[in-house]
Image (tube, rainbow, N blue to C red):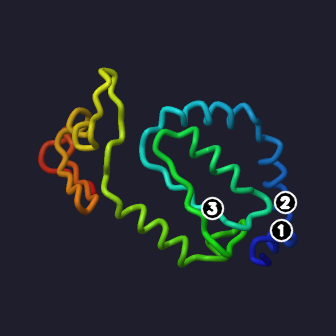
């Protein structure tokens, strides 16, 4: 905690910037962002501290319920600063999430369910999907030649 708090105690510039930031915070932006998130259909992992006193587990659970493809992963023996308390457990949760196969991610207008591959083919050019390993490589249609992303 000392490394987080020391700059604010020792630097007038840090305190000035924090005051400037806090004065500019407007709940309108949070509400606008929350409304836009309802349309986000990609997989979402919400790793959360089991013993967090500042941000209780109810928060990510409500957030996950508002998203079409989200889940909460509780990290045991941790509090607000999960990366500090349980870095290995957090890394394992993220790595496991990233290894999961890319499943169904979108509901097109016609009511048919489209796979990741279908959506990328429709919007970007060509996609190679390895559903067994959850890998996706994409060649965009924007440039000549082969632009590969993974």
Which SS class for mark 3?
strand
Q: Residues within 10 Å of mark 2 (few under 14, many from 20)?
A: some
Q: Above or below — where is 23 with respect to 135?
A: above
| Tag 2 near tag 1, CB within 8 Å | yes
Residue beneath the point at 48% across and 39% down: 68
- Give the mark nearest the N terminus, 3 or 2: 2
Residue 41, horizontal then vertical, whole percent: 43, 39
Q: Determine whether, in the image, residue 27 is placed left or right of residue 109.
A: right
Check disc 1: other Cα within 10 Å, few if <14, some if 14-19, many if 20+: few
* Left or right for 60, reference 116: right
Q: Distance between the residues labelled 2 and 1?
A: 7 Å
Report helix, strand or loop for mark 2. Answer: helix
- Which residue is labeled 1 in the image? 11
Please report contact status of discs 3 and 2: CB closer than 8 Å, yes or no.
Answer: no
Question: Of marks 1 and 3, which one's residue comes earlier in the chain?
Answer: 1
Q: Indicate the position of residue 47 as horizontal and vertical percent values.
A: 57, 61
The residue located at (63%, 72%) in the rendering is 76
Foreground of the two, 32 or 117: 117
Q: Quadrant of residue 120?
A: top left
Q: Please name whichever residue, 72 or 19, is drawn nearer the observer in this view of the structure.
A: 72
Calculate the distance from the C-alpha at mark 1 to the C-alpha at mark 3.
Answer: 31 Å
Query: Which residue appears at 84% of the width and 60% of the height?
Result: 15
Judging by the rendered image, the residue that carries numbered circle 3 is 48
Q: Dot 2 corresponds to which residue?
A: 15
Relative vertical location of residue 25 with respect to residue 83 in this rendering, above or below: above
Residue that extends furthest to the left in the rendered view of this protein: 145
Q: In which quarter of the image is the N terminus?
A: bottom right
- How far, Cα to Cα, is label 3 from label 2? 28 Å
């Amino acid at each position: 905690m000392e490394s987080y708090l020391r700059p604010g105690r020792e630097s007038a510039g840090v305190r000035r910037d924090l005051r400037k930031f806090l004065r500019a915070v407007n709940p309108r932006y949070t509400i606008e962002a929350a409304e836009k998130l309802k349309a986000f259909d990609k997989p979402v992992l919400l790793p959360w501290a089991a013993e967090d006193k500042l941000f209780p587990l109810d928060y990510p659970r409500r957030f996950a319920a508002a998203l079409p493809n989200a889940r909460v992963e509780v990290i045991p023996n941790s509090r607000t600063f999960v990366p500090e308390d349980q870095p290995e457990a957090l890394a394992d949760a993220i790595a496991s999430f990233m290894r999961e196969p890319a499943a169904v991610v979108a509901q097109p207008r016609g009511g048919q369910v489209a796979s990741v591959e279908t959506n990328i083919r429709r919007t970007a050019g060509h996609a190679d999907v390895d559903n067994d390993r959850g890998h996706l490589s994409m060649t965009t249609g924007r440039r000549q030649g082969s632009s590969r992303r993974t």
